[in-house]
Image (spheres, helix red, strand yellow):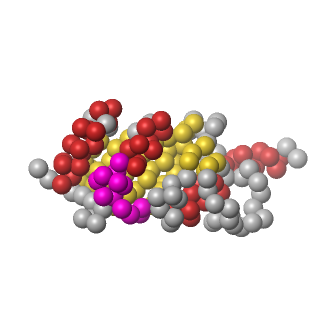
Amino acid sequence: MSEEENIKQRLADRFSFLADKITIKRARRLFLEVSMDNFSEVFDHAIKSLDFSMLSAISGLDEGDKFGLIYHLASDAGIMLNIKTSIPKDAPILQTVTGYFPSAEMYEREMVDLLGINVKGLPEGNRYPLPDDWPADQYPLRKGWKSDVLDNKENK
């Protein structure tokens, strides 16, 4: 059994609801999708029990009526575990992971600035990557953002 298959099996054994949600896309790359309700438990297990000790990135995606979030974790063995979850676009709230990875702060600031996601527990700090004078409620990675901006200008 490959290390990827071993990790997949360990996750499925621990979390039965993940059994059909874990895929091995290629060597050293695992992907799983989990509800936000179960995200913290799976994320914590991956770090503490499966030795995914590095956060490579957090990707935010506008998927129409929801935001998709992918947490890219790496192990010392060079295996990547990509944990995808989603939150509703009309209530985009999630908990920070800076307690696990202080480096998550920059990725989470990007989610705040570029998508308008409310990250609970994110330490106070400067905006990133947008400038401080960027207009409030303007999120350039949201679908339809440019048309929303143009509509607002025309209505003034």
Question: Horizontal placement of 18 versus 105: left or right?
Answer: left
Residue 55 is covered by the magenta coloring = yes
Residue 32 visible, this angle: yes
Measuring 38% from the left and 41% from the top, which residue is drawn there?
33
**Residue, far top:** 17
Q: Is residue 139 left or right of residue 78?
A: right
Residue found 29% across the figure and 32% down from its top: 16
Quadrant of the rendered structure where residue 17 is? top left
- Report which quarter residue 90 is drawn in: top right
Q: Which residues are magenta?
A: 45-56
The residue nearer to you, when weighing 127 against 47, is 47
The residue positioned 14% from the left and 53% from the top of the image is 2
- In front: 96, or 27? 96
Which of these two is toward me, 144 or 118? 118
**Coordinates of residue 156 in the picture (x, y in percent):** 88, 47
- The x and y percentages for residue 88 are 57, 36
Residue 67: x and y in percent read 54, 43
Q: Residue at x 40, y 56 (%)?
A: 72
Quarter occupied by residue 106: bottom right
Using the rendered image of the protein, determine whether residue 107 is visible from the camera's viewpoint.
no
Q: Position of residue 114 (x, y in %)?
A: 62, 56
**Count of numbered labels shown in the rendering:** 0
Up-down relation of residue 53 to residue 13 (above or below): below
Can you name the residue that lies furthest to the left here? 1
Whether the magenta-drawn stretch holds residue 107 is answered as no
Whether 147 is drawn above or below 127: the answer is above
In the rendered structure, the answer to whether residue 87 lies left or right of residue 135 reads left
Tell me: residue 102, above or below residue 136. Answer: below
